[in-house]
Image (cartoon, rainbow, N blue to C red):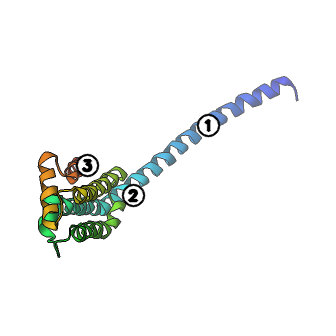
């Protein structure tokens, strides 16, 4: 085989190699586009199913935050005795029970939303404990008064969490 035959063979094979490379490139692009399309359609179908669940979770978190807002909690949960420690325990147990009832909602809300909700719960409990430790607080009714008075000076911890939830839900539209 001489060099002329080799060059002629190369000229004959070159168009086939070019056509093969172009076909491979277009086939690869087609497969990628098809995969992306299927992924998009799957996401779209999943979103139809999960969107109502996510909204329901945000509704439940809103209800939880409204229920643990100190002004509403203190009017809803009446003291069983005049003992401030018993009332503190009752309030904290009520908050914890509400929280445990909504634990599964963390699957549907963002991590940041869940963290802010937990922080609001903990801050509310801290507010109640702080009110119990004050010297002027000697009865359950006085504890109610101290906590409600503190709310006049600053907003309830759940207000910031509610504002965050509203913002996050508005971004879903």
Q: Nearer the viewer, mark 1 or mark 2?
A: 2
| Residue at horizontal 11 percent and vertical 66 percent from the top | 75
Q: Which residue is drawn at 77% across and 25% down?
A: 7
Identify the residue under disc 1.
Answer: 21
Other residues around mark 2 within 10 Å, as few (<14) / some (14–19) / many (≥20): few
In-image side of 32 versus 18 (left or right): left
The residue under the point 32% across, 56% down is 118
Residue displayed at 62% across by 39% down = 20
Lower sequence index among marks 3 and 1:
1
Secondary structure beneath dot 1 equals helix
Q: Where is residue 18 in the image (x, y as percent from the top left)?
A: 63, 33
Q: Nearer the viewer, mark 3 or mark 1?
A: 3
User: Height in image: 51 above or below 87?
Assistant: above
User: Could you tell me how far apart the alpha carbons at marks 2 and 3 are, in whole angstroms?
Assistant: 24 Å
Mark nearer the N terminus (2 vs 3): 2
Viewer-nearest residue: 73 or 50? 73
Residue situated in front as seen by the camera: 128 or 101: 128
Asked if marks 2 and 3 touch (Cβ < 8 Å), the reply is no
Q: Is mark 2 on a helix, strand or loop?
A: helix
- Label annotation for residue 168: 3
Front-most of residues 34 and 36: 36
Residue 126 in the image, given as x and y percentages of width and height: 28, 56
Rendered image: mark on residue 42? 2
- Mark 1 crowd level (few <14, some 14–19, many ≥20, 10 Å Cα): few
Left or right: 84, with 119 as reference point: left
């Amino acid at each position: 085989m001489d060099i002329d035959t080799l060059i002629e063979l190369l000229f004959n094979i070159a168009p086939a190699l070019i056509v093969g490379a172009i076909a491979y490139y277009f086939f690869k692009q087609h497969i990628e586009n098809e995969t992306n399309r299927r992924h998009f359609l799957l996401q779209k179908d999943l979103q139809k199913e999960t969107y109502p669940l996510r909204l329901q979770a945000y509704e439940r978190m809103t209800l939880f935050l409204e229920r643990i807002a100190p002004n509403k909690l203190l009017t809803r949960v009446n003291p069983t005795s005049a003992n401030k420690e018993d009332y503190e325990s009752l309030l904290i147990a009520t908050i914890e029970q509400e929280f445990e009832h909504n634990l599964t909602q963390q699957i549907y809300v963002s991590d940041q939303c869940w963290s802010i909700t937990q922080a609001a719960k903990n801050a509310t409990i801290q507010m109640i404990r702080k009110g119990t430790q004050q010297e002027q607080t000697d009865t359950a009714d006085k504890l109610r008064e101290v906590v409600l008075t503190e709310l006049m000076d600053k907003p309830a911890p759940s207000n910031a969490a509610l504002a965050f939830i509203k913002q996050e839900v508005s971004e879903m539209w």
